[in-house]
Amino acid sequence: MADHPSEKRIVAKAKVQDLSFSILGIIVLFFAMAMLATLIGDLLADGLGRISKQFLTDFPSRRPSEAGILSAWVGTTLVMFVTALLAIPLGVGAGLYLEEYAPRNWLSDLIEINVSNLAGVPSIIYGLLALGFFVYGLGMGQTILVGGMVLALLILPIVIVATREAVRAVPSGLRESAYGIGCNRWQVVWQYVLPSARPGILTGAIVGLSRAIGETAPIITIGALTFIAFLPPSPIQASPPFVNADWLTSPFTVMPIQMFNWTSRPQAGFHENAAATGVLLLGMTLIMNGFAIYLRYRLRRGLRS
Amino acid sequence: MSDSMNAPHPIRDTSGDQTMTQAPATETPVRAQVRDLKFWYGKFQALNGVSMPIYDRKVTAIIGPSGCGKSTLLRCFNRIHDLYPGSRYNGEINLAPEGVNLVDKGIDPILVRLLVGMVFQKPNPFPKSIFENVAAGLYVRGIRNRTEVEGRVEEALTQAALWNEVKDRLSKPAFELSGGQQQRLCIARALAPKPKLLLLDEPTSALDPIATAKIEELMDSLVKDVTILIVTHNLSQAARISKYTAFMHMGDLIEFAETEQLFTNPAVSRTQDYVTGRFG
């Protein structure tokens, strides 16, 4: 075999480049992961021991060892339910309209810019809006409904942008062939575009909800209470009509607020409680993200094999 | 090319006229007549007054180099251009016995697509079962009676020479089929509602030679029942399967003639250059 010194040098150089970038990447990744791991590890070390059945089923208390997060996790669940119920249909509807129906003109451009900008508005601004408009302007009070509404507003741009991106990613061939068999726009959107875009839309919606679940500022701004020793009325009842909406107008607290409240107390026991709440909140977020991945996988499998 | 936009245009392309006087030796009925059809993508004029007949239950092929407007012309027939802003038509595509001008602004594009079936370059079955794919066009037309739908799905799949391959797995996802089978499924989907015209936009360009041969064979049998208009960049394919051929270049219809004549004895020298491989 003949020798090719110059070609060999080029190959060697390329190998060095690849290797040095890989090493750099590993170092950066290590620092990022180490930081996250420290944070989570610290939280787990402090809080894991405190998580018990009692912690989940007791109301807050003056004594750290008797305090629990019952009202906080129930509040978080109900607020998230309202948020999802408002943000997903509104956001998906708006995204579909903007992508599939709206004519391309200066008005739709303006709306597009504004939606993108809204995604960057600090959450406390939404809190102020809700305080001024929902709580005082409309006299709705500091209720679960208002909490859900403000978080829905907060994540609405995320859901809209995710929907638009998912809809835009639907191959034009699918759209053309659906129109080609004589479908009208409604049929194309609901029977072909939406099912194809669903994995992306759901991912966006759950990413939005994961953000909302940890939000503290807007909820504090509207004046959610930090010490609640009762549960909202149950949404389900034994007598007809079996469901009621009274819980919507109930005062509430959520887990991040409970956490915030406990960290500002002097006793070490409360700090432990806060860490435990943090672990649970993290767990809830992870479960939601895991669910998003699962859904995406399931739905994609149905679309392409 | 945009200069010709303002230039006075003859009602018919001269070459088209010439051959059309020769064609009716057999007195084939015309299924659709294209008359001075112009089309614009925004400011760009892609068709400069195309006139040609589409003969009933015959295969008409449109050939020409890339960018000549052959796909643009085909896509006028089912108004798929309407999906994209800035598209504009002028002229006529008259369906013969119905007397409907397909590109008339007053005619809803959805009505046009209910009359005309189309198969695209890339096989694009819907993410549904094989059965639901073929039935989709029937559902859109309000045909929901189970027996009727099943009958017409079987009929269309048989016409598309796919029935024997899929009859035992109609409820399986369409994506499990091979590329050639998917394309025949798309043909079945277009056939099920019994279209007045079947448009095929380079239907075999994404397929291997065996799958291509199957589809060409299929067209031979289909043409007994349906009028076929096919765009192809494959000259020998046009020669094999079509009865009439239109040669286009730069948005103009250069020549329309019986396929045999167009390939062996074209009236226009540019056609000759193209079919003999001197350009394109």
Image: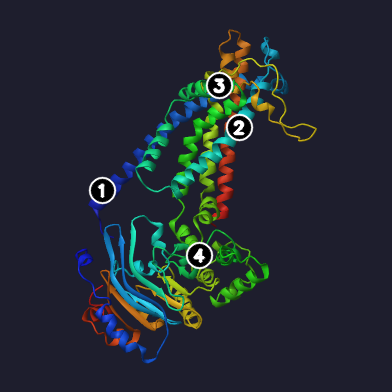
- Label 4: few (<14), some (14–19) or many (≥20) C-alpha neighbours in 10 Å: many
> Number of callouts in the render?
4
Chain ID, mark 2: A
Amino acid type at circle 4 is: Ile
Asked if marks 3 and 4 touch (Cβ < 8 Å), the reply is no
**Badge 1 density bin: few <14, some 14–19, many ≥20, Cα 10 Å:** few
Residues beneath discs 3 and 4 located on the same chain: yes
Amino acid of disc 2: Val
Which circle's residue, 4 or 1, is located before the other in the chain?
1
Q: Which residue is located at x 50 percent, y 73 percent?
A: B195
Q: Amino acid at mark 1?
A: Arg
Q: Are marks 4 and 2 in contact (CB under 8 Å)?
A: no
C-alpha separation, residue under disc 3 versus residue under disc 2? 16 Å
Same chain under badges 2 and 1? The reply is yes
Q: Quadrant of residue A67?
A: top right
Residue drawn at x 43%, y 56% is A172
- Give the mark nearer the N terminus: 3 vs 1: 1
The mark lying in front, picked from 3 and 2, is 3
Looking at this view, name the residue that lies furthest to the right. A239
- Chain to which the residue tagged by mark 4 belongs: A
Residue denoted by label 2: A82
Position above or below: A286 against A51: below
B41 over A224 or under it: above or below? below
The image's colour scheme reads: rainbow
Identify residue for label 4: A181
Taking depth in this image into account, of B37 and B245 the one nearest to the observer is B37
Q: Position of residue B233 (x, y in %)?
A: 34, 72
Mark 3 — residue?
A: A135
Q: Position of residue B84 (x, y in %)?
A: 38, 56
Q: Which mark is residue B265?
A: none
The image position of residue B83, as x and y in percent, is: 41, 57
